[in-house]
Amino acid sequence: MMGISVSNVSKRYGDLMALNRVSFNVNGTGCLVLLGPNGAGKTTLMKIMTNIIRPSEGNVSINGFNVRENPGKALETVGSLIEQPEFYPYITGYEALMFTCRIRGISKEKCISEVQRVSTLTHCRDYLNRKTKEYSRGMKQRVGLATALIGDPSIIILDEPTFGLDPNGMMEIRDIIMKMKKEKLIVLSTHLISEAELLADYIGIIDHGRLMHFGPVEKQRYLEVKGQINEAHVNVPGVEIVKKDDVRMILRKSDGVDNWAIIKALETSGSIIETFDYYSIIEDLYRNNVSQTDAEM
Ligand SMILES: Nc1ncnc2c1ncn2[C@@H]1O[C@H](COP(=O)(O)OP(=O)(O)OP(=O)(O)O)[C@@H](O)[C@H]1O
């Protein structure tokens, strides 16, 4: 099974610990979102994962191959877009993509159709014949993403893929990621909680170089109840109250607990329910794990 293993990775820049003993494993398909404020260490971690820089300590393995010792094998099926893409200014986007096809070992005959495929996916065909020095930030971002998709890699590592895109562009890229994550392993960084909520199957929260939280996003497990719930008791096995005030309550439930059982218990105990819905816990995790001065939503 495809997977990434990050083991005790630290990175020092002089006195600064940009990453401090980060470890996690992620396997199979889905999307791991690395969420954290500016300067948290997300890009540094992704650069280490793709062998752009070397860790001060620790190791990264992809599909069982150590990224530093065996980069050819480890990164064979990995596509990536790290930081803002930069292209040689006098070449066109088309030439940049063709060049990447050749580097990735795609045969000459197949390059044209592959460039068409990735540029259609990322909606950058209209300006592929213009020189990259004329591109806006968003245009560069789309061509950069197209570059990451060349060769149809099974693992894709994307550093802030929607950075610099207009709202439509953001939605298009998120749609592409939603589709791709069904059959690929995607790792992406963002400082936007809304983006994490939409895309994450696994979440890693990074602050000041430390991995503060790592785990699956249990989308169906958390419920938000609003209404008059000041006297609420939820005597349902497998249900616990995570947070509660007079008008709002967050619940966590175990597998197999029926939402109707919870509603019934709440009403029986005298609550008046106005809304009852699934709740994304990511914002809470972020608030609890990122130092307040840095928190930006
Ligand atoms: N080459 C470098 N030399 C010195 N310090 C660096 C270098 N690269 C990164 N840093 C520092 O390491 C820390 C982590 O930076 P990094 O770019 O990984 O953060 P980030 O989470 O990706 O932030 P952002 O969301 O702003 O892109 C920051 O304090 C940054 O200033």
Image (spheres, helix red, strand yellow):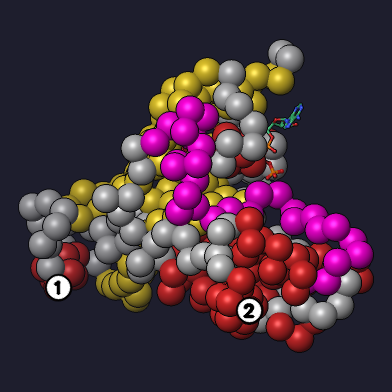
Q: State the residue at coordinates (81%, 58%).
A: 87
| Image quadrant assignment for residue 86 | bottom right
Q: State the residue at coordinates (14%, 73%).
A: 260
Front residue (pair 254, 192): 192
The residue under label 2 is 112
Name of the residue lying farthest toward the left: 237
| Image quadrant assignment for residue 195 | bottom right
Left or right for 50, reference 180: right
Residue 273: in sight, yes or no? yes
Q: Is mark 1 on a helix, strand or loop?
A: helix
Which quarter holds ligand 1?
top right
Front residue (pair 16, 99): 99
Residue 196 is tagged as: none
Amino acid at the residue labelled 2: Ile
Q: Is mark 2 on a helix, strand or loop?
A: helix
Magenta region, residue range:
65-93
Spatial CA span between label 2 and label 1: 55 Å
Front residue (pair 86, 37): 86
Name of the residue lying farthest toward the bottom: 126
Front residue (pair 79, 94): 94
Q: State the residue at coordinates (58%, 36%).
A: 51
Residue 230: in sight, yes or no? no
Left or right for 107, reference 167: left
The residue under label 1 is 260
